[in-house]
């Protein structure tokens, strides 16, 4: 291991706990904020194309998110195995675990890329997109383009997960910031080209725009351009991340031989990663189901839901960041045989998130119309703003419950009990969220507003269920095998 990586790793197994948790989690929160920046930038610039374009990426993202979740769950295995091995002092095993997890995740994402491209038309119809409409055509182009770039997206995700397990969350933050900057610059050109490009108008460069258009005739790729910009900038970030791992400058030092899969490690990756993939896919499946329910209320409701979910994803970023930080704190402390300290880390994160999300929810409630209006223009803008405002005000009241749920789930995953986290994700996002929303929008005929109330009620109930089980304490039992060479997943 090289010293530069050691300097950036946060010590979470000794001394004070609250400060290291915040220091570890804050860069993850900022990294996640920048991740949402990718989506918001796409939504903003696509919004210049009108309601049909926004609805198209709303349909697409429900599908892309599902496929991303299936592969991204395996990155959790990288975090858990690196964290528990480091906490247990098995640093000589970290390179092999990290390299094999990287190659496994990229292979999985490549397979999903091919399958997703082929069945994209069928998947879009499942979430309510109607063949023959403009929304469907645009959505299909965006979805297939995103599928082609999945391996590039996941090469960066696994880099982030491995360094998180090591305790270095700043390096992925710097790399993500660079990628978002590239994406923000590329988006307007890939989407709008050199004709009626709002960016040129803002900068006062209309004459330059006219000259470029006259020379190239380039009018952009429209909705597909948003996907192309994301894939290209992700690919650049992924290449830098892999180079850093091979150079040894980030603490974890990989060699080409570390990327060769071995049966024992692959089995561990599957035992931890497969349930985590299912857990994350539950969120994506829920999003797809809710999108289909919202589609009953019309295209304006779908556009409002697409914008609202992106805003929600930004508001709950502190919870998602703390949850990932909790994974590292719990993993390293259980690896060091300090279960009480691991449990205290979850409690501390829950308190922080309750305070943070209460304040954020209040701000979202007040500014809801302005927030939604920022992302939509055109003839249907007023209707989309009204529906989206209702979404943010109703669902926003439950943000604090969703935040607590994410933090507790991070504790389960950090212990290796990813099957337990999977069960609660299924209960919350599928059984509760989908069934309550369906009852309100279907039999009770409450329209999109019924879906919003269903989502809010499910958030509260699933937080209560996971929290009560966490209090039992059995989730942290027998996580690390004291006789074996490394950690094994919990069997809760």
Image (spheres, rainbow, N blue to C red):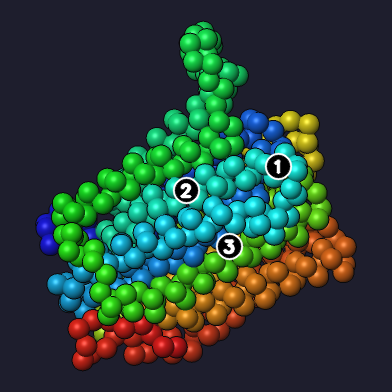
SS for dot 2: helix
Compared to residue 447, the image places residue 39 above or below, namely above
Pick the front one: 226 or 160? 226
Numbered disc in front, either 2 or 1:
2
Residue that numbered label 3 is attached to: 284
The residue positioned 57% from the left and 43% from the top of the image is 142
Residue 148's mark? 2
Q: Nearer the viewer, residue 230 or 358?
A: 230
Can residue 122 be seen here? Answer: yes
In the image, which is nearer the foreground, mark 3 or mark 2?
Answer: 2
Q: Position of residue 410 (x, y in %)?
A: 44, 71
Does residue 349 appear in the picture of this structure?
no
x and y percentages locating residue 455 in the rendered image: 69, 64
Q: Position of residue 138 (x, y in %)?
A: 65, 40
Q: Which residue is mark 1?
A: 135
Circle 3 — which element? helix
Q: Earlier in the sequence, mark 1 or mark 3?
A: 1
**Label 3 environment density (alpha carbons within 10 Å; few <14, some 14–19, many ≥20):** many
From mark 2 to mark 1, how far is it between C-alphas? 20 Å
Residue 263, percent across and down? Answer: 28, 78
Residue plotted at (34% across, 90% down): 478
Label 2 CA crowd tier, 10 Å (few <14, some 14–19, many 20+):
some
User: Quadrant of the image for the C terminus?
Assistant: bottom left
């Amino acid at each position: 291991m090289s010293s530069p990586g050691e300097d950036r790793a946060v010590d979470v197994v000794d001394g004070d706990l609250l400060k290291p948790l915040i220091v570890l989690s804050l860069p993850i929160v900022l990294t996640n904020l920048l991740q949402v920046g990718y989506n918001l930038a796409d939504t903003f610039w696509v919004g210049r194309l009108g309601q049909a374009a926004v609805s198209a990426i709303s349909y697409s993202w429900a599908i892309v998110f599902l496929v991303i979740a299936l592969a991204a769950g395996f990155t959790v295995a990288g975090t858990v195995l690196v964290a528990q091995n480091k906490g247990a002092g098995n640093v000589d095993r970290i390179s092999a675990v990290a390299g094999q997890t990287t190659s496994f995740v990229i292979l999985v994402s490549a397979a999903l890329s091919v399958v997703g491209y082929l069945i994209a038309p069928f998947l879009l119809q499942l979430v309510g997109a109607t063949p023959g409409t403009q929304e469907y055509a645009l959505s299909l182009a965006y979805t297939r383009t995103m599928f082609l770039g999945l391996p590039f997206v996941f090469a960066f995700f696994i880099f982030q997960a491995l360094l998180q397990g090591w305790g270095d969350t700043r390096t992925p933050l710097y790399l993500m910031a660079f990628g978002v900057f590239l994406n923000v610059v590329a988006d307007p050109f890939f989407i709008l080209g050199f004709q009626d490009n709002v960016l040129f108008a803002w900068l006062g460069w209309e004459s330059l725009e006219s000259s470029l258009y006259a020379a190239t005739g380039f009018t952009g790729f429209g909705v597909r351009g948003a996907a192309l910009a994301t894939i290209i900038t992700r690919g650049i970030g992924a290449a830098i991340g892999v180079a850093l791992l091979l150079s040894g400058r980030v603490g974890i030092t990989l060699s080409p031989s570390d990327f060769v899969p071995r049966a024992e490690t692959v089995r561990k990756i599957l035992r931890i990663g497969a349930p985590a993939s299912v857990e994350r896919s539950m969120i994506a499946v829920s999003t797809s189901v809710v999108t289909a329910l919202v589609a009953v209320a019309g295209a304006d409701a779908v556009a409002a839901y697409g914008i609202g979910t992106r805003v929600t994803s930004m508001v709950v970023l502190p919870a998602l960041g703390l949850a990932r930080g909790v994974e590292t704190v719990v993993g390293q402390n259980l690896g060091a045989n300090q279960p009480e300290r691991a449990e205290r880390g979850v409690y501390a994160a829950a308190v922080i998130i309750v305070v943070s999300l209460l304040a954020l929810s209040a701000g979202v409630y007040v500014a809801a119309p302005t927030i939604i209006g920022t992302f939509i223009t055109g003839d249907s803008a007023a209707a989309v703003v009204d529906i989206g405002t209702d979404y943010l005000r109703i669902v926003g009241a439950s943000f604090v419950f969703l935040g607590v749920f994410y933090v507790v789930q991070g504790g389960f995953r950090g212990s290796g009990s990813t099957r337990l986290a999977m069960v609660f994700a299924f209960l919350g996002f599928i059984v509760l969220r989908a069934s309550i929303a369906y009852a309100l929008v279907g039999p009770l005929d409450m329209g999109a507003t019924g879906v919003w109330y269903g989502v809010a009620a499910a958030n509260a109930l699933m937080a209560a269920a996971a929290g009560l089980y966490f209090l039992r304490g059995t989730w942290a039992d027998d996580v690390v095998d004291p006789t074996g060479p490394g950690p094994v997943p919990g069997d809760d």
